Amino acid sequence: MASLFSKDPTARPPLPPYAFERIEQEIAHLRAVSARHKAEEKTTMARVISCLAICTLLWLYFMDPFLYAYHKGEAIRTYLYLHNYGGEQKTQALLATQILSPSEKEALDHRQGSYQDYFANTVQAEQTADSIVNYMNGLYYLRKGDYDELDPVGKLRYLLFFRTGLLPPIDWSGLTPSVQN
């Protein structure tokens, strides 16, 4: 029986670390690996695009509670400023959108304070009121289904959700600011 630890005298000695044959083998291996990475880049790009599409759809579905809360906070500030410092027409337009309920309007009417710091001038407050009115009108047209009156984002949301029967939420009580007495 032959020993397991015996050497074969005809075997070639191992190649030195920087032998030409070893370098060629490594180059061939790297070329094969880099070809595989190109395929992985395509799948990675597809994953990123898919993730962005899903996040966009989620934002389009859940954007109203966040935007409504923002606009309601702005409506409170704008109403207080316009009610105390002029702009009756814009105040009535703001109230007509029903972003502020009648009880909230009454509570705001009885508030005392200096609201001049809310806006630099009446023009800025009126522009904010116009922005709030436009948002609420867009929300009303979207809920009503008046496709021709919608902006491009509203039209996209109508086609994606309202035509399929998925009604996005308008507001969440946890996000929406309230009028404190």
Image (spheres, rainbow, N blue to C red):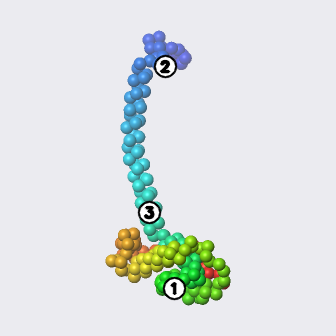
Secondary element under disc 1, as helix, strand or loop, is: helix
Please state which of residues 153 and 2 is positioned toward the viewer in this rendering.
Answer: 153
Q: Count residues near mark 3 (Cα–Cα under 10 Å), then give few for <14, some for 14-19, many for 20+.
A: few
Q: Earlier in the sequence, mark 1 or mark 3?
A: 3
Place of residue 19 in the rendered image (x, y in percent of width and height, measured from the top left): 44, 18
Residue 95 in sight here: no
Q: Amino acid at mark 2?
A: Pro
Q: CA distance from mark 1 to mark 3?
A: 39 Å
Residue carrying label 1:
88
Callout 2 secondary element: loop
On the picture, is 26 further left or further right than 75? left
Q: Are marks 1 and 3 in contact (CB under 8 Å)?
A: no
Looking at the rendered structure, the kind of residue marked 3 is Thr
In percent of width and height, residue 136 lies at: 46, 78
Closer to the chain start, of discs 1 and 2, is: 2
Mark 1 residue type: Glu
Q: Which residue is mark 3?
A: 56
Whether residue 180 is visible, yes or no, is yes
Q: List x then y, in percent, for residue 1.
A: 52, 16
The answer to whether residue 131 is above or below residue 93 is above
Residue at (61, 79) in percent of width and height: 178
Q: Residue at x 41, y 35 (%)?
A: 33
The residue pinned by badge 2 equals 17
**Residue found 43% across the figure and 22% down from its top:** 22
In the image, what residue occupies the spot 51% across and 73% down? 124
Please tell me whether mark 1 or mark 2 is closer to you in this view: 1
Front residue (pair 122, 32):
122
Q: Could you tell me how far apart the alpha carbons at marks 1 and 2 are, in whole angstroms?
A: 88 Å
Extreme-left residue of the structure: 148
